[in-house]
Amino acid sequence: MPSRPRECSIANALAVVGERWSMLAMREILLGVRRFDQIARNTGASRDILAVRLRKLVDVGLLEREQYEEHPPRYEYVLTEAGQALHAVLLTLMAWGDRYVTEGDPPTVWEHECGEVLRPVTVCAHCHEPVRPEGMSVLRIDQPRP
Amino acid sequence: MPSRPRECSIANALAVVGERWSMLAMREILLGVRRFDQIARNTGASRDILAVRLRKLVDVGLLEREQYEEHPPRYEYVLTEAGQALHAVLLTLMAWGDRYVTEGDPPTVWEHECGEVLRPVTVCAHCHEPVRPEGMSVLRIDQPRP
DNA sequence: ATTGTGCGTTTGATTATCCAACTCACTCGG
DNA sequence: CCGAGTGAGTTGGATAATCAAACGCACAAT
C-alpha cells in the first residue's frame, strides 16, 4: 500500500523557496540588493545555480525582472507582493538563528518604525498573545492514511 | 580579490535546518509524530537521508533521542528547547504558504489557547504592531567588502 | 588598445538524493 | 513453532543537483 506525504502549506512553501540559496537570494533582495553579481557575492551561491534559482523565483511570482538598461539588456530583480510578504518568514528565522545558532551578537540589527530595535515575535492575530507550542492545538489537518 | 558571503543568522539557521526534509521532519515532530517510520511516511523523505537528517538535528541540539524500548533499542525523537522554538518559524512559513502558494483552503488549521482559529502574525515586541517591509530599516549589518 | 564590469552559460568533476532491497531484533496470529 | 509483520535503520547502484572555474558577449572607462 503506497503512502502519500502529508498535504501541508509548509511543504508547499518549501517547494517554492526551500531549495538551497533561494531564501538567501530573497534576503538580499529584501535588503535592497537587486543585481545578479552582488546577490551572488553576498550569498556565496555559484552563478549558474543562482541564475536557475532567480528564474524560478520569477516564474513562481516572488520576483519580477525590471529592465534598467537597454544595450545590453540588464535587469534588476524586484519583489512582488508575495515576495515582500516573505519578510516575516525571514525575520522569524533570523530571530531564531540569533537565539539558537549564531554565537555572539546578532550580525544584523533592524530598527522598527516605532524607533526601537526590532525584536520580531509571532503572536495570535486575535488575542495578540505570543504563540507557544503548548498553547496551540490542531483543529484540522491532512492525515495520510492510504 | 576573493569575496566572502554575508555573515547572517538566516544563513546560520539554514545551515542547520535548511537542507531538504529537515524542516518537514521538524514539522512532524512538532505535530507529535516521534517515530522514524511515521516521519518518513508523512514527509515523503527516503529513509536513508531521513536517518542522516535526524542524526544531524540531534547533533546540533534540536532533537534528542529517547529510548522507549530496550530490546531491540528503539528511540523516539523529542524536541529540545531550540527545537520547540522553531515552531514560530514553521507557523510563519505555513501562513505564508497558505496565502501565496497553496491553492484553496489551508490544509492545516490550528486553534489557539484563546479559543480562536490561529492566524499567526509577526509583530514588533516593543510596539506590538505588525512588521511591514517598509516599516523597518537596517541598523547594523555585515557588509561584505573584502 | 587594454582593462574592467555585468550577467549569465558551459564544462567537467564532485556530491546529494533517490529507490529498492537488506539486516536485525523483535511481536503476534494460527 | 512457523511465517508474516513491524520498527529502525544501512547498503548499493543509478540519477540528479551542485560546485568552481572558464567562457561569451556587450559595453564603459582609461
Image (spheres, coloured by chain):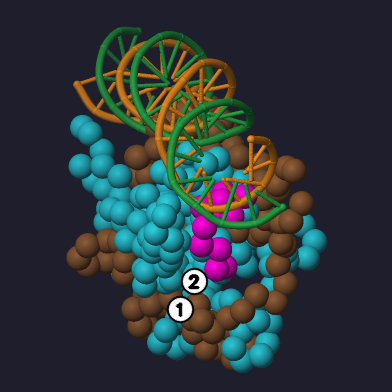
Chain colours: A cyan, B brown, C orange, D green
Specify few, some or many for label 1: CA neighbours under 10 Å numbering under 14, 14-19, or 20 or more.
many
Q: Amino acid at mark 2?
A: Ala
Say which chain tag 2 marks: A
Image quadrant containing the C terminus of chain A: top left
Q: In the image, is residue A33 part of the stretch drawn in magenta?
A: yes
Q: Give the label on residue A87, or none.
A: none
Instruction: State the residue position of label 2.
Output: A88
The residue closer to the viewer here, B135 or B128, is: B135
Q: Where in the figure is residue B80, as x and y percent of width and height? A: 62, 55
Quick check: can you spot residue B103?
yes
Q: Where in the figure is residue B20, as x and y percent of width and height? A: 46, 42
The image quarter containing residue A67 is bottom left
Q: CA distance from mark 2 to mark 1?
A: 8 Å
Quick check: can you spot residue B94?
no
| Residue found at x 59% / y 55% | A38
User: What element does badge 1 sit on?
Assistant: strand
The image quarter containing residue A57 is bottom left
Q: In the image, is residue A127 part of the stretch drawn in magenta?
A: no
Q: Which residues are magenta?
A: A31-41
The residue closer to the viewer here, B32 or A93, is: A93
User: What element does badge 2 sit on?
Assistant: helix
Q: Amino acid at mark 1?
A: Val
Say which chain tag 1 marks: B
Count of numbered circles in the view:
2
Q: Give the label on residue B121, or none.
A: 1
Q: Where in the figure is residue A131, as x and y percent of width and height? A: 51, 75
